[in-house]
Image (cartoon, rainbow, N blue to C red):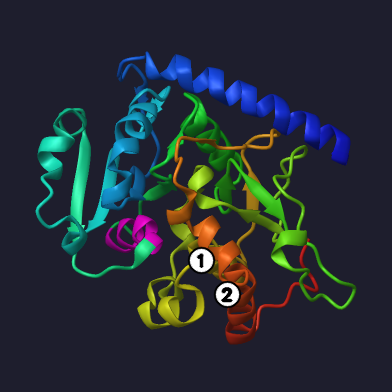
Amino acid sequence: MSKLLNAIYYRLFRLYKKIYLQVFSKKTVDILGEKANLENELIVSFTTIPSRLNYLPSMIKSIFNQTIIPNRFIMYVYKDEFEGINLESILELEIKNGLEIVYVDENLRSHKKYYYAMKDNPNSIVVLVDDDIIYPRNTIKKLIASYRIYPQCVSAMRCHRIKLFSDGSLYPYNQWEYEISGATIPSYLNFFTSGGGTLFPPCTRNEDLFNKKNIRELSFLADDVWLNFLVVKNGIKTVKATQYKGTPLTIDDNPEESLVYLNAVYDNNNDKCIRNMVEYYQINFTEAK
């Protein structure tokens, strides 16, 4: 998409987002969707921190209002961060509707959203979401449709495209193709942003994924880098579940707490983590397609 068309798209998207969020705020929880009917259990997983609790009812409502409902919907939180906070009271309605809260003993930051769901449920299909995004009603339906076609791939609603130099080395992260659209073809060069809505089949599990030492040393502030590069290392491609860009309907108005902000402020942390992953795991994109 040309720069001009991109500029037009994002200007229109800002207007669309404003209207969408206004309309969505007036909707109630309906839970009218069908239960996921797959060969494996479908789990939707996410994490949060205390300062983002105000966003949760809207995000959670958007999952309960999906046309296809997950078998389980789990929020993982670091117990020490929520000391003195009664989540069961704050999220009483959401829990009644099916939300599960799991308190964990170790603060793996954003890695909590996948780590325990995948480790404790090795045969489950896990969909990752973020705590500050509203998900359109057909998000899970689209991910499942993609999974049925590509059961050995990660299916994602939003991807960037990794760009390579002629020698196979990677361009800096901020020079990749941002929010790709068009053909839904599996590729090692599709870099999913997990919070946009991303489905991980059981085949994505491996011992490396749960190596806490490497998580902390190689990519602690960039969970998407960790997940994407381990997927590539293990010969698994990523496919877009939609032909559209998948620009997220974010409700977070405090970017200083986001990983996007941290990665930008602290000398592009993504590129540091990418170098760590490529060097440590000897990941070669020369043959990537």
Residue at position x 44%, y 71% in the image: 209
Q: Position of residue 221 (x, y in %)?
A: 47, 68
Residue 86 sits inside the magenta stretch: no
Q: Amino acid at mark 2?
A: Cys
Quarter residue 1 falls in: top right
**Where the C terminus falls, by quadrant?**
bottom right
Q: Nearer the viewer, residue 240 or 158?
A: 158
Q: Is residue 271 left or right of residue 19?
A: right
Indicate which disc, 1 or 2, sits on the residue closer to the N terminus.
Answer: 1
- In front of the other: 26 or 153: 26
Residue 284 on image: x %, y %: 72, 77
Alpha carbon distance from label 1 to label 2: 7 Å
Above-or-below relation of 248 to 279? above
**What's the residue at 57%, 51% (across, down)?**
193
Q: How many marks?
A: 2
Q: Position of residue 30 (x, y in %)?
A: 30, 16
Instruction: Give me the residue at 40% from left, 49% from top.
Output: 126
Above-or-below relation of 46 to 28: below
Find out whether the residues at labels 1 and 2 contact each other: C-beta distance under 8 Å.
Answer: yes
Look at mark 2 in the image and give the residue it sits on.
Answer: 273
Nearer the observer, 232 or 244: 244
Give the label on residue 222, or none: 1
Residue extent of the magenta highlight: 110-120
- Regarding mark 1 in the picture, which secondary structure is present there? loop
Marker disc for residue 66: none
Principal SS element in the magenta part? helix
Q: Secondary structure at mark 2?
A: helix
The percent position of residue 176, horizontal first and vertical second, equals 76, 58
Can residue 50 be seen here? The reply is yes
Can residue 71 be seen here? The reply is: no
Q: Is residue 128 left or right of residue 230?
A: left
Give the residue type at disc 1.
Ala
